[in-house]
Structures are given as C-alpha cells and as structure tokens.
Image (spheres, grey):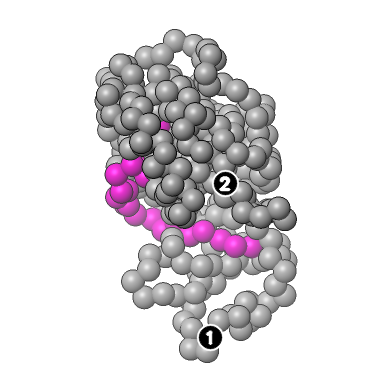
Amino acid sequence: MLKMGQVNGIAGVAMVLALAGCGGGSEGGSGATLGTDASLSGGSAFLQPLFAFDNEFDFTPEGLQDKVIRSKYSKAGDVVSIKEEVVSGRELVPLVTTFVMTRTHILKTEGIDAAAGIKSALMTNSTDTTYTFAPYTEEQGKIAGLVTFHYNVKPLSGLLLADSLNESFSLIPSQTLKMRHLRDSGKTFPTGSESLVVSKVINHEDMAEFSSDEVTELMSIAEWEAMYPKGTEFRSYTFKDLDVRCQHVVDLPLQDQTCIGSYGGRFYMVTMSPKGEYLLPAGQMVYFNQTASTALTDGIRADYK
C-alpha cells in the first residue's frame, strides 16, 4: 500500500495498498480544479484532500516499465478513500482483494477500483499530530489492524520540487537520471505549498498481510525451503487460520524478511508487520496539499523524462 506507499508493510495495512491502486482520472493536473486549498497547519489530518506520489515498476512482457502515480486521499466521515492517476508512464492494472490477519481476526478488504475511488481505510482517530487507521473491510470492523501515524507539517514554498520525492524515485539508474533532470530544471514549490510528513508508525498488534494476486505455485512449505541454500534458517509464525514461514536473516527486521503463508489451501507471499513502534526515514511517507501537489504534478510531467 501510503501507495502512500508501503512502509515495510505497515502503510499497506492501513491504506489497503494503494500499495497500490489503479486507474485513471485527471484530478489535480495542469488546469484541473480540485476545490479550495487550505493550510495543513493547526488541523487534523485529512480535513482536505491530500496527495502522495510514488514511482512504481511494472514487470510486463514488454519489459520493465516505470510510472509515476499520484494518489488522492479524501476523508468522508471516518472513511478514507483513494483515487489514483498515472502522472507519467503506463496505466495501472487493478489490484485485487487484500487480507490482513491478526492473532484473533481475519480482515478482508473490498476489491479495488481506483477509477471509482477506493474505500481504503477507517479513520478511528485524528489530531493535529497523529491519525489512526483500521483497514476498510467488508465487515467494517474498527478494533483490529489498527495503525497510528505520527506526523509533522512542513512548509515547502521555495524548495526544489525534486527534493520532496521519496526514495522510490532513485532505486535504479534510469530513475536517478530522471530525478536529476527535474532537479536541474530549478523548479520550486509556490507560496502556500505544504506537506504532511509521517515520522513514526505504531502497529497496535502483530499483523500479516497478503493479496490474492500473490498466489504462488508451491505445493508445500518444504518445496519453498528447498529453493534456498542448505543451512538457511527458517522460522514459523501462526496467526488465525494462517501459517507463516519466513527465511530468517540475522539483523534483518521481520517486516523485511521473505515470508510465505498457507491459507485456504493456497500459498501466498506475506508481509509481516510486528507490533511496535517504527521510526521512518525523513521523506519516506509524505502527503502534499493541493497547491504542492499541482506544482509537483506539472513538474513531473514536464521535467521527469
């Protein structure tokens, strides 16, 4: 999923992966109108639409493709919805059902349809420094899968557009060159631009997450383990109706380890999100107000080539 981007699986749990979403639309680009902009300062999160940008990779028969995606997050009542558009690159393919498992609950998200807007989360609490999400599920339960985000508001006016983009824009050399082109353009954010920067994430309980497009062709756990060199260490974790097996790497956090899970007679790639508090690197999870989003969108379309 922030997809807002996935933060070691944590953001994905909260935002049902926009991790990512799908589809078209043209909100907020050059010449578009999204409504009255407002300052993020002094108010709770999502009192106005917020936007997140990610660079994603699409492994297709045509070869590696990259695309810039802008996600628009809007809050109506306690429901946070997302609508995504491709700012640069190929259109997205709709994602499918996502499951979140805790020790006591099985949470099943609704199917994703970004063109119509996705109900992505239930906001159970929001202040001027924190917000708490529960996954939006078919059952609309608000007691399991809770994740609390701590954030700060950062003024952007006068800062370079390129300096606001997260690490997903510098993963391989081609993206580094594109970033340099945007930075060399010298374009900056206009007056009124602000961002909401997440600094810390708290998982209220142990969680495991997987989606129905991550089905593997494995017949058994033993078959998966046999793919690794002899002597590789594995560890098991049991959730409600989900048995997880992870390749254990010393000093690698559980949320970054490679795991598979058996559920309903099938195997899935699983992301683990242990209970606890996690500090985020600066800029990893950022939302923009409308003014900043429009400037960044125009800059990417013109100079991120």
- Say whether marks 1 and 2 touch (CB < 8 Å): no
Q: Which residue is labeled 1 in the image? A: 229
Residue placed at 49% from the left, 78% from the top?
Answer: 234
Say if residue 16 shows up in the picture. Answer: no
Residue furthest to the top in view is: 36
Residue placed at 61% from the left, 49% from the top?
Answer: 65
**Mark 2 secondary-structure assignment:** strand
Report if residue 272 lies within the magenta region.
yes
Q: Which residue is labeled 2 in the image? A: 66
194 or 179, which lies in front? 179
Magenta segment, which residues?
Answer: 268-287
Residue placed at 38% from the left, 31% from the top?
Answer: 185
89 or 20, which lies in front? 89
Q: Is residue 134 above or below residue 246?
A: above
Q: Is residue 119 above or below residue 12?
A: above
Q: Is residue 81 above or below residue 207?
A: above
Give coordinates of residue 223: x percent, y percent. Answer: 66, 80
Q: Is residue 179 left or right of residue 121?
A: left
**Neighbours of disc 1 within 10 Å: few (<14), some (14-19), many (20+):** few
Give coordinates of residue 257: x percent, y percent. Answer: 46, 67
Tell me the kind of residue under disc 1. Answer: Pro
Q: Is residue 224 left or right of residue 123?
A: right
Q: Residue 255 sits in which quadrant? A: bottom left
Label 1 to label 2: alpha-carbon separation: 32 Å
Q: Which mark is residue 45?
A: none
**Neighbours of disc 2 within 10 Å: few (<14), some (14-19), many (20+):** some
Say if residue 155 shows up in the picture. Answer: yes
Tell me the kind of residue under disc 2. Answer: Asp
Give coordinates of residue 80: x percent, y percent. Answer: 51, 29
132 or 32, which lies in front? 32
